[in-house]
Image: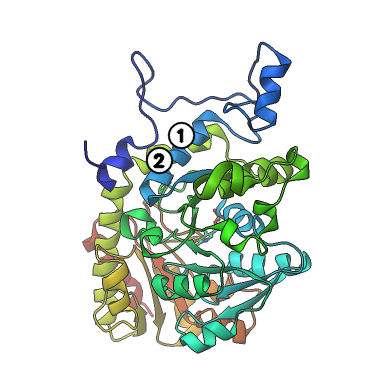
Amino acid sequence: MSVPSINTLCVQGGYTPGNGEPRQIPIIQSTTFKYDTADGMGKLFDLEAEGYFYSRLQNPTCDRVAAKITALEGGTAGMLTSSGQAANFFALFNICNAGDHIVSSSSIYGGTFNLIAVTMAKMGITATFVSPDCSDEELDAAFQPNTKAVFGETIANPALTVLDIERFAAAAHRHGVPLIVDNTFPTPVGCRPIEWGADIVTHSTTKYMDGHGGCVGGAIVDGGHFDWMAHADKFPGLTTPDESYHGITYAERFGMGGAFITKATAQLMRDFGCVQSPINAYMLNLGLESLHVRMARHCENGQAVAEFLAGHPKIAYVDYCGLPGDKYHERAKKYLPNGSCGVVSFGVKGGREAAAAFMEHLKLAAIETHVADARTCCLHPASTTHRQMNDEQLAAAGVRPDLVRMSCGLEDKADLIADIAQALDKI
Ligand SMILES: *Cc1c(COP(=O)(O)O)cnc(C)c1O
């Protein structure tokens, strides 16, 4: 059979039951696994045999769901984490040590900005932030001899900028480092960054992948294309023996396709323990089974709401790459030909106060610090998720003080538009 389409992989990827086995991915709710001999288990510890010994490192339920996400992204290996924050931290920290440096798009999720700019800085890992629309010269100038990774978001939350993945990948590769792309908003149904040159893809599965506001989670997928050994001096963690693992050299033992995820599991999961629970992984998989169906509706509703807002006299501006006049429309046509996502950002005329008043009049759309679930919700980032940023940082992140982020759910688009219309009428 030819490679199944992404629609089929959403439903059946990652797990193929054998004769008489459960049709649904079984929840292996067990911390530990039993062995007949100490020696047999020792081989697992030494990464010489495959198997499970402790759910802090690996669990069969989580691995099957990770395998589905890996297939969806077209990667070679993947893992689940307890949250999207953990996924981005692991993806970066797996190759950055104290004294190293990251080049990141400035237009990223507030939590990730804080992680990179504040918390990782405390660990001695510095960063240079560049506009996703910077010139090639500006991008090249951001690199330092100690740069180990480039980071960006396919569609940034909440600014909705679209990353020119090919250009950022080319710059990263010119400087001998991988491009890590957070693909949370489009999901692999909308864009597969590895096909455009990204090396590592991360997700907050909390968003569309789960899609029901049910469980926090994250995922990391390795595309398997980055040659660590060709840049051995930059990535000693992958290319020299790991003394905490009996002298294993990950890039030698597990190759380009497996080294990154094996190291992240064996070292970072072991030491930080940011695991997803098996029951959450099971729920995540229920969401993944309908991801391709839901994304189409999220995009349809986002497009309809964006078009309505763009024509409304009380709206100052609308950011949605599906709108022909949008700054990112052309780039979206290339990277997101089937639609972007259900999230629409816009400004209400009258600024901060008008935005807040508008949101309070909404009946269907709830005020939540969440996006990308089945129910429509909205948020005022400047007073919530991005409140730790000063005006300059807000501007760099593409977040204006009057910006409202609306995440269009799966309701009927006519009802969503009617709700927005009545709330705008009241201000
Ligand atoms: C929400 C989000 C995160 C953080 O994920 P959590 O699951 O909340 O930890 C990271 N990146 C993006 C783009 C997000 O939207």
Residue at 56% in and 74% down: 175
Query: How far is mark 2 from mark 1, CA to CA?
Result: 6 Å
* Element carrying mark 2: helix
Q: Would you identify the image quadrant in which residue 297 lies?
A: bottom left
| Nearer to us in this view, 214 or 206 | 206
Quadrant, the N terminus: top left
Q: Can I make out residue 162 in this image?
A: no
> Does 261 sit above or below residue 39?
below
Q: Which mark is residue 64?
A: 1
Position of residue 64 in the picture relative to residue 84 (left or right): left
Residue at 36% in and 54% down: 188
| Residue 92 x %, y % | 62, 60
| Nearer to us in this view, 243 or 368 | 243
Q: Can I make out residue 250 in this image?
A: yes
Residue at 73% in and 39% down: 245
Position of residue 91 in the picture relative to residue 133 (left or right): right
Badge 1, how many Cα within 10 Å: few under 14, some, many 20+? many
| Residue 381 x %, y % | 53, 72
Q: Which mark is residue 251?
A: none
Q: Provide the residue designation for mark 2.
A: 68
